[in-house]
Image (cartoon, helix red, strand yellow):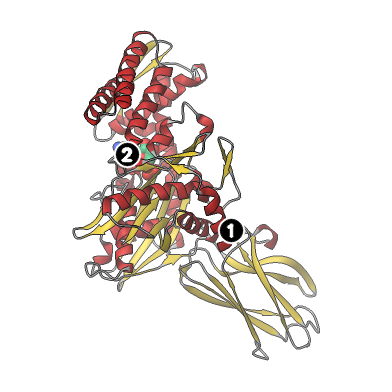
Amino acid sequence: MIVGIDLGTTNSLIACFSEEGPRIIPNRLGRNLTPSVVSVDEEGNIYVGETARERMSLYPDSVVSAFKRSMGTERQYNLSGHMYRPEELSSFVLRSLKEDAEVFLGEEVTEAVISVPAYFDDKRRKATKRAGELAGLTVERMISEPTAAAVAYGLYDKTRDTKFLVFDLGGGTFDVSILELYHNILEVRAVAGDNYLGGEDFTEVMGKLFMQKQKLAMSSLSEKEQVRLYKQAEKAKCAISGSDRVVMKCLIDGKELESEIKYREYEDACEELLNKIREPVKKSLSDAGLKLGDIDEILLIGGATRLSVIRDFLIRLFRKFPDTNMNPDEAVALGAAVQAAMKERREEVKEVILTDVCSFTLGTEVVVEYEEGKFEDGRFCPIIERNTVIPASHTERMYTVRDNQDKVRVRVLQGESRFARNNLYLGEMTIDLPKAPKGQESVDVTYTYDINSLLEVEVKVVSTGLNQKMIIKGVDNTMTDEEIAKRMEELAYLKIQPRDQEENRLVLLRAERMYEESLGDRRRNLDHYINRFEAALKGGDHQEIADTRRELSEFLDDDEDL
Ligand code: AMP
């Protein structure tokens, strides 16, 4: 079976297509969301998800998160003295998801459809594919996240042509995409976004509002108090949706402080953030040549779209209610599973043609004659422009700039700058021309960019018909097949933790962290429950372990609510 995977910045999910339709596969802890967090200890043991996240406060140097942001870059992360690339860290998350799916399905899983943000360029998509390979998965197809969401909402089943806006507000990123469905083709028309805007900013606003009400300065808080404030602000932020006020409490300087925050106050305080959201919405619409009123449906993905301030803002902006039928965390993974079913040609789903957009401009370097006889070289000439629907093929004709010029060099570049030097170099080729006065000879340069991120470049001499082609599969940072195989071997010594002990380990880690954070009676009580649980673990009696674990967890839940 081909599975669908949402490899997210904050959380990842895996889904399959069952007889009842797409469904999320729970992880070893029985949860649908696996935090995209990885930790490696001194002995080379790997922890993924909740357990890795819980190690954060005890062993901060051994934990990383949000590495998806660096996908496709040269960045390396040091975890307890071992160095990892972003795709290697992602491969650990994928391996963990793959294992969970194998246990759930009772069969080996070797193929997957993985979602990627629509704006991911070639380098980042290839790095994602490599992450899959390192995890032992053949990546059958990559699907852009907004397309996956649209597919999950069942939009491919619509009979009427429709225009959608997919609004994706996660923890730290914001993406907006315009999609159009016509004649069974689902097309991404434009993408825009802000990489530094997300639900976390809305939490910060809540925290600041609380401090204002308490007439306290942020700078007066210790690091621990700041963490506490943030946690409480996060809770208050989630609670304020659907009610007109919330009471936020926080332990500062040994005292439990309390403030009531009204929905209106919070909404006003978020105004600056809401204005920031408006910009990418406008940009995507104008890139797609549409107006606000042209949008038929608004789909929400990303945890922060549960915020009422966001929903109310969208209703005011579009004078329309967004579709809220789906869990915004799960839509992308479910869509990837539907795409996997389409790939397998399952009868339950009809095949739709999914297109995508090129999220960057592809072009070449040219010499420009800006005045009679005066030339400037190093300029960039776009051939396939950003947000062009792919697969796409475009041709530009280029003329000689010197008398008797007998060669043309075509440099292939990616980027948005007017100057070639600022854009990313992907490759080049040179072709011979017959000698002639300047401007009389020409070449047609054709770029064909396909949905699997392969760029074919063809250069044809117009007068002689001589032509040359090349396919650009990779840019500098890619690993060859041999390199992947070698690195897989190197990583093989790393041991992903056995899944059956995961829950015990997680509870113990959480208890250890809270032990460090508490004092006095709380600490003594906690110690008592930890000892009981550890004794049960040593004894090996399953029932005893489950009982003492539950007791300890309940104690921790009550304690953390303080
Ligand atoms: P994601 O990256 O899609 O997992 O989204 C994470 C963001 O969603 C975080 O900023 C959370 O605070 C936010 N979030 C999750 N649940 C809620 C909720 N019920 N109300 C408001 N924000 C939420």
Q: Position of residue 163 (x, y in %)?
A: 32, 63
Residue found 38% across the figure and 36% down from its top: 50
Residue designated by label 2: 500
Residue designated by label 1: 483
Farthest residue in the front direction?
A: 539
| Quarter of the rendered structure image containing ligand 1 | top left
Image quarter hosting the N terminus: bottom left
Spatial CA distance of label 2 from label 1 is 33 Å
Q: Is residue 268 left or right of residue 123?
A: left
Q: Is mark 2 within 8 Å of ligand 1?
A: no
Secondary structure found at label 1: helix
Q: Is residue 28 left or right of residue 516?
A: left
- The quarter holding residue 291 reads bottom left
Amino acid marked by disc 2: Asp
Farthest residue in the left direction?
A: 20
Q: Is residue 218 above or below residue 324?
A: above
Does the image show residue 309?
A: no
- The quarter holding residue 270 reads top left
